[in-house]
Image (cartoon, rainbow, N blue to C red):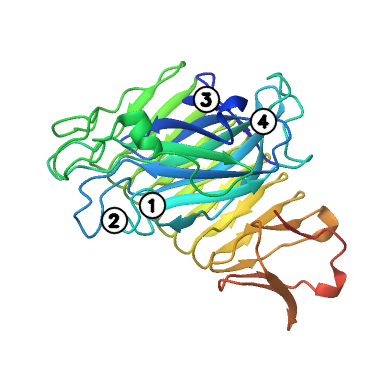
Amino acid sequence: MPTLNVPASGPATTISFNPAAGGRAIGQVTLPTQMGVTFVKLDIPQGAQTIQVRLLPDQTDTGLTGLVEEAWLSASLYREVEPGQFLITTIHGSRSVDDPYIGALDPDRIQEFDFPVTAATRDPHSTLSGRGAFFLVIEGQATPNIMGGFLSGRVAIEVSVDQAGPTGVDPRNVLWGPGWIQPYGEANPGAPTGPVQPGPVLAPTAGPDTLIGGAGNETIDGGGGEDYIRGGDGNDQIRGGTAFDDVHGNTGNDTVYGGLDHDWVVGGKGEDALFGDDGNDLVLGNIGADTCEGGAGADTVRGGQDNDIIRGGAGADYVSGDKGADTVSGGEGADLFHSFGDAGIDRVLDFNRAEGDRVLLDPGTQYTVSQVGADTVISMTGGGEMILVGVQASSLTSGWILVG
């Protein structure tokens, strides 16, 4: 199974449950101004059965037809399996719902998803008084402000245990006060002001580097050490180098390599070619028709939006085409092929039950399995399909498909 290594800086925040406060806890993060990955630790009460997570971005004037908030964000969940290593529990195509606190003023703009807590998903190594520790991984960025700079990038997080729907007052009122909605064109509290200029490309060193690209087509190499690299605009060539690297292509058609060790490799906007290389990597295509490859190691490889090519590479990988009509291969190893009801029509080229490959569908997904010519077809309520190319359904042994 794929694992994710959290950098030494740790989570952006921890959301802890107070048993006396009931079944809800809240917290907040501030997303970066360029597409990035943010960690939130969830301290879940022992004995919890179902957890609902709701992401409530900061917004602007509710009088606008289309509210302005974070351009795009998604979430996945990991649990600790060994000290410092985290196993992916589930990736959901989060549902879009009306804002439960301001209703029709903000239709279909809040992201919400559920996941079950079972003996298989509860943290077996937690030292937190018997409570399970999970990590919520949020990918997203603050929205540019038409007057220059960026909006605040704030996101409130509401976590409910064993109960659905809102269970208290709006978390944003609690965290930011009742005046948190700001007119569009005015910076929200805490937002950068004035135009934000891309920084210079710095020469790599043997240690940690922060390298920010500009508007052109650039070649950036992190060298040694734990690097933070952003490509900026243009069609960039980026290499993370050795050690853990947080590497994002951002805007443009970029080619990005994680290099050695466990890396985060993210495409951003554009048609990108992304390679995790060696190590247990997180490879995210994001927006655009991308080619995403994990390389050697137990990788998590996701396409994001549009029609992508997904390759897990050697190792036990978690591969998900996400939205769009994707072409997916796991490579060598016991791979987990993920899909959900409205994901699109995905073709899996190398499903091999003898190697331990399995299919994982989101909780509650209704599906049928049929034989269409030489292929096994999984048809899901919502229109999604996963086609296992060249696989006879009669050959599939018990446990080949999971829901949850």
- Residue underneath mark 4: 45
Amino acid under label 4? Answer: Pro
Closer mark to the observer between disc 1 and disc 3 = 1
- The secondary structure type at the circle numbered 1 is loop
Residue 45 visible to the viewer: yes
In this picture, residue 372 sits left or right of residue 262: right
Mark 2 is surrounded, within 10 Å at the Cα level, by few (under 14), some (14 to 19) or many (20 or more) other residues, namely some
Q: Earlier in the sequence, mark 1 or mark 3?
A: 3
- Which of the two residues, 229 or 306, is positioned nearer the viewer here? 306
Location of mark 2 (residue): 105
In this rendering, the answer to whether 354 lies above or below 214 is below
**In the depicted structure, whether residue 111 falls above or below residue 154:** below
Q: Are discs 1 and 2 less than 8 Å apart at CB?
A: yes
The residue identified by callout 3 is: 14
Report the residue marked by disc 1. 99
- Which image quarter: residue 398? bottom right
Q: Residue at x 58, y 66 (%)?
A: 341
Packing grade of label 4 (10 A; few <14, some 14-19, many >=20) is: some
Q: Is 167 above or below relative to 374?
A: above
Residue type for callout 1: Asp
Task: Give how far apart the Cα atoms at labels 1 and 3 are.
Answer: 24 Å
- Identify which amino acid the numbered label 2 is placed on: Leu
